[in-house]
Amino acid sequence: MAPTPTPSGFCKGLTFSLFFIHVIASPPFACDQSNPSTSSFKFCTTSLSINERVWDLISHLTLEEKVSQLVNTAPAISRLGIPSYQWWSESLHGVSNIGPGIRFNGTIRSATSFPQVILTASSFNREIWYQIGQAAGKEARAIYNAGQANGLTFWAPNINIFRDPRWGRGQETPGEDPTVTGKYAVAYVRGLQGDSIDGSRGPTVRLRASACCKHLTAYDLDKWEGTTRYTFNAAVSSQDLADTYQPPFQRCVEEGHASGIMCAYNRVNGVPNCADYDLLTKTARSRWGFYGYITSDCDAVGIIHDSQSYAATPEDAVGDVLRAGMDVNCGSYMQQHTMSAIQQGKAKESDVNRALHHLFSIRIRLGLFDGNPTKLPDGNIGPNIVCSNEHQYLALQAAREGIVLLKNSPKVLPLSKNAIKSFAVIGPNANNPQTLLGNYAGPPCNILSPLQALQRYVKHTQFAHGCDLVACTSEALIDEAVNVARAADHVVLVMGLDQSQEREELDRVSLSLPGHQERLITMVSQAAKKPVVLVLLCGGPVDVSFAKRNSKIGAMVWAGYPGEAGGTALAEIIFGEHNPGGKLPMTWYPEEFTKIPMTNMRMRPDLNSGYPGRTYRFYRGREVFRYGHGLSYSTYSYEFLSPAITPLYLNLSLYRDPSLSNQDSEHLIYDIDQLGSEACDQVQFSTTVRVRNSGQMDGQHVVLLFSRPPVVSNDAPKRQLVDFKSVYLKAGEMREVHFELRPCEHFAGTLEDGRRVFEGGPHYLMVGNVERLVILVA
Ligand SMILES: *[C@@H]1O[C@H](CO)[C@@H](O)[C@H](O)[C@H]1NC(C)=O
Ligand SMILES: *[C@@H]1O[C@H](CO)[C@@H](O)[C@H](O)[C@H]1NC(C)=O
């Protein structure tokens, strides 16, 4: 609606007095109704389409103004009443001030800090994933409404596949499985952007906050040996791209309707991601229907010339990324070189206009061109929602459901607090609250270290560091720890990694625990009266084969980086107030895996060269703990309720690729793209699994449904997670869990050229150790 012009004399006095209140408490916005000289622009007219508004806005801009907007710190255009905008904010596991868009220096001083994503993933609970996204979106809006933000575009989720256990940023991802990663992305994006959990709002026009699927694509190496992400050229096969690296991004866009994408630093098969027209425009925009904005990773445009020497001059780099479909540059490179690129004919103003169209569409969808946003639907989200009880409880629940019980024999856990007179807590990770948060965290609402949380159960608790730091380069503190352990009824060791060992720009070179940690653990467990409990805080997996074997180490718990409530959740699990049910979202490899260069992107094994392949889908070597591993204080059993063999008749008039078919009618191969979604929908079916909690304790339980092909080949995954559900079961309770399956999605394989297909004939579904044969008959 166009604002009604008001007589200026009266209005000015009023605006002036309001202005003072605004400076403190108001968020930045364009199209201020109280300023008729700017609010009368057509681009401020909310009844017009976004498209019309954006083109009108662009028509007012000079070329200099246009160029100025192509960077993350977009300056104000005061003559049009447009404030500055910060594209870079972070919300990986809660709103963070790592990006410059968010400031915790006003009324709001902290935000709910959820578990680091790798641990949230291990709950396999889509509702929790959605709720976390939603909580972060609401907190973000509250921070904006309070005038402590100058952007609402968040550069999360990180949905690169955790391809190699050494990756320093594996902690930020939902793990190594493309299906889980894609579903995590969808849930988080829908939550953050203000969509419903089932996506029923569809392609949301209005955004509460904007999410960004990053980093497109095949980025999962930071700094390993001599290789950095800035220059790494990932050699990726069409097959691996199609069924490992791309599916999370495709889902994030198609089902999540994410409004942002970030292109990654690295090159893929020679081409820098941000300069890849096939990737950004043909694949993301045309094939997946992406209609948001594309940002570069920070300084990822400059490196195309400076470090990768892919572009001969800065202007060529700018021309390349604009032509490819990138819209905004984190950094200042585009501000510096776009004008000269246009003058030299290396970039076109029409590409700049396209970029601006994408950028301003997002700002309008965020409601920042509709007058004072505090009067709009999300304008009533106040500061009280930040760190609300509900959000803090969600952080606790996510940590509880994520934490994984790796080992528990002979039923060392749970401990009984009443039976313990003296208790020892040992380890460099026991009393450092910051470690619980992982990277990309903001200041938490409330936090207790594991030691502080455990002390609430047993008054008489002795603490020993055991190692000065997580790196544990000195043995000087081991004796003291051994003495503390010897005197206690029970011992909990809190060990593992922290950001000094794995982080952005730091991949590991070993999977062993750092320094003398193993020695400390072994000596403490030797001295202790009873088998000890070993808690591991780490994002990436560690080779703890020694502890798995050692009967003096009775229980092992993996807690990722469990967030602000993680200490509490850990203590609840150790003392049996919560029954653990998390499952590992990544394979735990033995140290010998590090013989493989991290730079080898190949997923599939190559038995000729002894290359074992990667992730549970392809890896052929020994595992320390397998994907999906996770114990409970209860036991669960499964049964398929449908008959052991279920033939599924396919309609033969559906398309099939004659060049693929081997003529045997049971083994017809169908090209999924050629079939199309309508035909694919004709051949869906459902399967039901009965799950029974046959133990003594109620618990949340994750049912993981895998498929496997009848014949193991190097080309196809050994197993592939098809779907998963998290259900709550009381002791003794039985529940039926239904799965809807579409052969086009759930029995799909990939040809070498990247084509997705499914094959008629036998397939197996598996839950735990139970299998069911499904025969797809043509
Ligand atoms: C918070 O920080 C921003 C950016 O540094 C600054 O502009 C603003 O004045 C600060 N606010 C307060 C209340 O200190
Ligand atoms: C087979 O598929 C075709 C094309 O979709 C459709 O017209 C036909 O009715 C189907 N036949 C059966 C038996 O379902």
Image: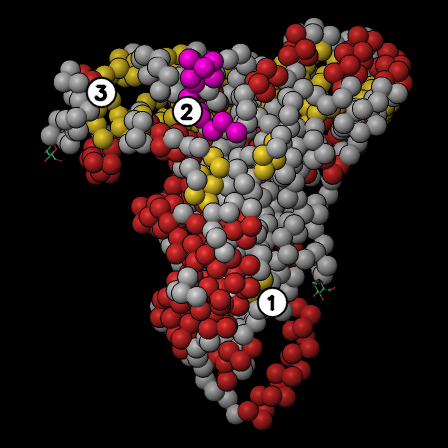
Q: Where is residue 461 in the image (x, y as percent from the top left)?
A: 85, 23
**Residue type for callout 2:** Leu
Residue depicted at x 65% and y 40%: 439
> Do we see residue 474 in this rendering?
yes
User: Which residue is under mark 2?
Assistant: 721
Q: How crowded is mark 3: few (under 14 residues within 10 Å), some or many (20 or more)?
A: many
Residue 523 on image: x %, y %:
80, 11
Determine if the C-beta at disc 3 is less than 8 A from ligand 2. Answer: no
Q: Does the magenta stretch include residue 469?
A: no
Residue at point 42%, 32% (across, down): 236
Q: Residue 27 carries which label?
A: 1
Who comes first in sequence, dot 3 or dot 2?
2
For the stretch drawn in magenta, the main secondary structure is: loop
Q: In which quarter of the image is ligand 1?
A: bottom right
Closer to the N terminus: mark 1 or mark 3? 1
Q: Tell whether label 2 touches label 3 (CB within 8 Å).
A: no
Amino acid under label 1?
Pro
User: Which sits in the foreground, 83 or 14?
Assistant: 83
> Residue 40: which quarter of the image?
bottom left
The quadrant in which residue 447 appears is top right
Q: Do the residues labelled 1 and 3 touch (CB within 8 Å)?
A: no
Specify the amino acid type for callout 3: Gly
Q: Is mark 2 on a helix, strand or loop?
A: strand
Q: What stretch is highlighted in magenta?
A: 599-611
- For residue 760, the mark is 3
Q: Can residue 377 be seen in this view?
A: no
Residue at 40% over, 65% down: 345
**In the image, is 249 to the left or to the right of 420?**
left
Q: Nearer the viewer, residue 310 or 175?
A: 310
